Image: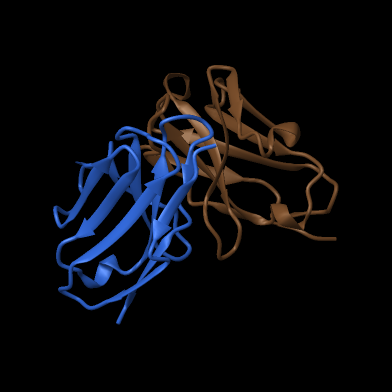
Chain colours: A brown, B blue
Amino acid sequence: QVQLQESGPGLVKPSETLSLTCTVSGSSISNYYWSWIRQPPGKGLEWIGYVYSGSTNYNPSLRSRVTISIDTSKNQFSLKLSSVTAADTAVYYCARHYHLDPFDYWGQGTLVTVSS
Amino acid sequence: DIQMTQSPATLSASVGDRATITCRASQSISTWLAWYQQKPGKAPKLLIYKASSLESGVPSRFSGSGSGTEFTLTISSLQPDDFATYYCLQYSSYPCTFGQGTKLEIE
């Protein structure tokens, strides 16, 4: 079965770069779109961006700070969010989808707290 | 960006009740709408896609309807497991956007 697992530091200092990796099993990473979505504590969901076979698309609200990349050899994709502030504190999810399709498989989510 | 407005924010209901949640889009999205269920500490779970198609394995008491800018999620007879938060998602264009959520709580 398809499984996604986020990994990375749970605590990041303000102004630094948040880095997360999503490891995919049970699905070829080459055939799908892979997104990052976040959810601040007690709040709603925000799509961050996707990567597909090397091409990317980012939410304009975060575009200047976001980089999403893919490593097909490891079946992983990654998120980097620069210049973080407390407003970036959230549970970060990775998810699978097709182009302009809903997210069908999600990781369990990882809480990242921005604090000094 | 397309804005998604869900109502109500909170819905109190009892087991066996019929529950209806509405999502409105700021512009037409045809039927490119999905519904998700989220429980505390868990990732969202896909229930409905393309406005009215039931995801595999989802109970038939869940149904979706609508097109254009108005959409509805209906749970025909609430079960204890259904009390959760529900989100709509438009995927007509990027950035895809979610509604703000509806918390379905036990009355």
Q: Residue at x 37, y 39 (%)?
A: A104
Q: Quadrant of residue A49?
A: top right
Q: In the figure, A1 relative to B45: above or below?
A: above
Who is closer to the viewer here, A22 or B4?
B4
Q: Residue at x 33, y 48 (%)?
A: B35
**In front of the other: B84 or B107:** B107
Residue A21 visible somewhere in the drawing: yes
Whether residue A1 appears in this view of the structure is no
Q: Is residue B51 left or right of residue B24?
A: left
Quadrant in the rendering for residue B32:
top left
Left or right of A98? Residue A10 is right
Figure label count: 0
Q: Residue at x 38, y 35 (%)?
A: B28
Report which quarter residue B68 is drawn in: top left
Q: Position of residue A63 (x, y in %)?
A: 69, 32
Q: Position of residue B71 (x, y in %)?
A: 30, 47
Give the quarter of the figure containing the N terminus of chain B: top right
Q: Tell which residue pokes out farthest to the bottom in this image.
A: B107
Which quadrant of the figure contains the C terminus of chain B?
Answer: bottom left
Q: State whether residue A43 is above or below residue B14.
A: above
Q: Position of residue B57 (x, y in %)?
A: 20, 47
At x 15%, y 62%, the residue is: B76
Vertical arrangement, residue A90 with respect to residue A49, above or below: below
- The location of residue A23, given as percent across then percent down, is 53, 36
Q: Is residue A68 above or below residue B2?
A: above
Foreground: A32 or B18? Answer: B18
Q: Camera-side residue: B17 or B28?
A: B28
